[in-house]
Amino acid sequence: MKGTVAIIGSHPRTRSEFDFERTDCDVWLFNEAMSGKKNEWAKRADAVFQIHDEIIWRNPSNRNDEGHCKWLKEQKDIKVYMQDKYKDVPMSVRYPLDEITERFSISYFTSSVAYALALACYLGYKRLELYGVEMETNTEYQYQRDGVALWLGLARGLGMEIDAHISMFDQPLYGYEGEVTIPYETFERRVTELQPLLDDLTAQYKAAFFELQKAFDLFHGDGSQAVEQKLFATASRQRDIAQQLGEISGRMQENKKYRDKADTMKEAAGDFLFSRQEFESAASTTKTAADKSKLEFVSLGTQLDMIHRNVKVAAKGSRKRDQLMEAYMQQTHIYLQSANRTAVYIGASKENYEHLAWLDKHVRAAGGEKSEAVLLERIREDAKV
């Protein structure tokens, strides 16, 4: 046992900040991190936590790694903390739940990370490093975050040095940093951030367009399976770029809209203020538009598939094949436009929801009269509905 333990979750935002070449610390990972084929980021581990019920880790249809149970039974190098010691898992170690609960008089374990933090406290590590653990705001993790916070607090109270490479504590200071409106600079910053992405994707789309045209020309004269698969792959790439470009465009449009509207308000009144309803309404409207556009997109895809089938059976060099190919290319462009348009709505909706999340977080932190004023405004808005 070394003096430092690095506990590494799977979130890509911060897990990459750990250097797996290090030898000065013990490395603890979770679940399928060392067995899953998709987890090439996990280079080594001294221990893995598999605290789930036996029926879960023995499941041959494990959605993360079908070979996980086989790995548990066959590997003989990495300690695996589990609910019990299992004869067919040679490296399994019973997690000392009773001992930890008795020592600290705490029985609050809301996630595998909480179990790992508690064990680090129990074993007496001097330094604890945490990576790849974000516990973001979806329903699955909301209640888990408190457990992580509690055991990190206990570790600090025990005198352990903490180096947490996580963003879950990046919250505004209550009463000091809270705001009731999004700063003007936010919209300008987002436009600046998104512009290079927009430019790059636009260039990619133009380049992919020419590749798609060449694939169509080749398929026109040669309907072999290899040529057909090449056309499918090229069209799929074009669609993916169209969707990425659409989402960035939608996000960009929303920020430009708010920036320009703020400019107008500042010119007229010297300042600007967007109510929460501004973003909530825009998010709802664009989401509804996205849902409607998705239906059109699916329908166009069905039509495109029918045309493709007709082209395949049309005689090469025939006038009918020429006409079908022309319709095929036109329908493909309409399909790509629909993919792009749908993604624009999706991007716009996402951007508004992110602005809403920022606003809600900072309003809660504003405290006092500022926070109360916004809450009262929300009540009045709801009453109008």
Image (cartoon, rainbow, N blue to C red):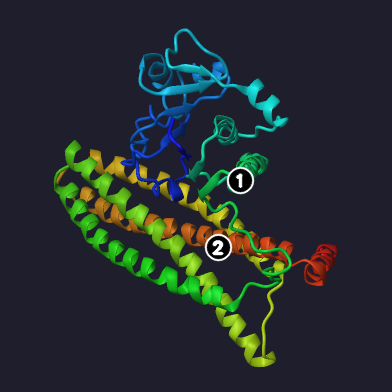
Q: Secondary structure at mark 2?
A: helix
Taking 30 as reference, is 114 left or right?
Answer: right
Asked if 127 appears above or below 63 in the picture, the reply is: below
Asked if 174 appears above or below 46 in the picture, the reply is: below
Q: Are marks 2 and 1 in contact (CB under 8 Å)?
A: no
Foreground of the two, 131 or 125: 125
Residue 226 % position (x, y): 17, 38
Question: Which of labels 2 and 1 is toward the front?
Answer: 1
Q: On residue 156, which mark appears?
A: 1
> Dot 2: few (<14), some (14–19), or many (≥20) neighbours within 10 Å?
many
- Residue that lies at the very extreme toward the top in this rendered image: 87
Q: Secondary structure at mark 1?
A: helix
In the rendered image, which residue does mark 2 sit on? 351
Q: Amino acid at mark 2?
A: Glu
Asked if 66 appears above or below 302 in the picture, the reply is: above
Q: Report the quarter where the C terminus lies.
A: bottom right
In this view of the protein, can residue 59 be seen by the observer?
Answer: no
Residue lying at 57% horizontally and 30% vertically, measured from the top left: 119
Q: Report the quarter where the N terminus lies.
A: top left
Taking 112 as reference, is 220 left or right?
Answer: left
> Dot 1: few (<14), some (14–19), or many (≥20) neighbours within 10 Å?
some
